Image (cartoon, rainbow, N blue to C red):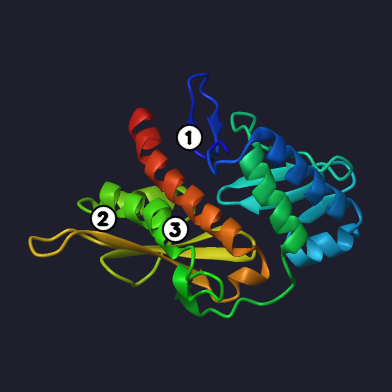
Amino acid sequence: MCRMGEEVANKERCVRGRDMGGSNYSLTIEEAKKKLKKMKMVDICGRSGAVHSPKKGFSLAYLNDVLEIQPISFTVRCSDPKITIDPTFELLVLHYLRDARNSRLTSKWVSYRELPSGGFYYPVFRVRAEAPLAKRFGSHPDLFRKAAFTMGGEPIQYGDAACKILTFPRLPLVYILWAKTEEFPARASVLFDSSAENHLNIEDLAYLGQTVTRSLIESVRIMRQSK
């Protein structure tokens, strides 16, 4: 999946992701679309926080962008024409629309491995979502703050630098950075609201965290190019 915030050679941005054969993605995407087509529009909006318009179809906030989903084909695109959506991110969006529940956030922050199904997948999540953050920003916490700000991040009091980032309407994430010192290496943690598995399955949550981490890292390059 192409990454939100990543500029490619033709100056479009995309969102990159999970390894899966193209045919498998196509089948999985079609299955998700079939389920969504059977659901009532009002239910989809109530569960996911999306907004429906007779002219534009569904609109769904993601980071600082707005995703547009056609109500008949359930094709996903971004309102920003420079951003392209590839199949892995499209699948994540469809799963969120299909699976999200109309439930309140608990405001209890937990690590990925503390989620009910997270223990088994945590080693992979740590390598793909947390370790790259520590490697890139461990010596530059101010740069991390700037990168988070470009994605709508809200500063909060954890570690040496931390921010709360709203991904989809019912899925905020907290990114925490502990800066490198002479005695200790840098480390990072990604926290979820304890209700997160109400809205996406554990593998999709891992991919969401990985995608946002990549966007944070890529935003640094974009900021430097814009100077």
Q: Secondary structure at mark 3?
A: helix
Q: Earlier in the sequence, mark 2 or mark 1?
A: 1
For the point 52% across and 58% down, the residue is 206
Q: Secondary structure at mark 1?
A: strand
Q: Is residue 227 visible?
A: no
Q: Would you place residue 179 above or below residue 70 in this image?
A: below
Give amino acid for label 3: Phe
Within 10 angstroms of label 3, few (less than 14), some, or many (20 or more) residues? many
- The residue singled out by tag 2 in the image is 141
Residue 21: x percent and y percent? 63, 36
Residue 127: x percent and y percent? 37, 54
Within 10 angstroms of label 2, few (less than 14), some, or many (20 or more) residues? many
Direction from residue 63 to residue 139 in the image, left or right = left
Mark 3 vs mark 2: give the one in front.
3
Direction from residue 107 to residue 54 in the image, left or right = right
Q: Is residue 99 visible?
A: yes
Direction from residue 157 to residue 150 in the image, left or right = right
Residues at marks 3 and 2 touching, judged by CB atoms closer than 8 Å:
no
Give amino acid for label 2: Pro
Q: Closer to the camera, 63 or 212?
A: 212
Residue 8: x percent and y percent? 49, 25
- The residue singled out by tag 1 in the image is 6
Residue 42: x percent and y percent? 87, 62
Give amino acid for label 1: Glu
Q: In which quadrant of the rendered image does the C terminus lie?
A: top left
Q: Would you place residue 9 above or below residue 97 in this image?
A: above
Residues at marks 1 and 3 touching, judged by CB atoms closer than 8 Å:
no
For the point 50% across and 48% down, the residue is 211
- The residue singled out by tag 3 in the image is 125
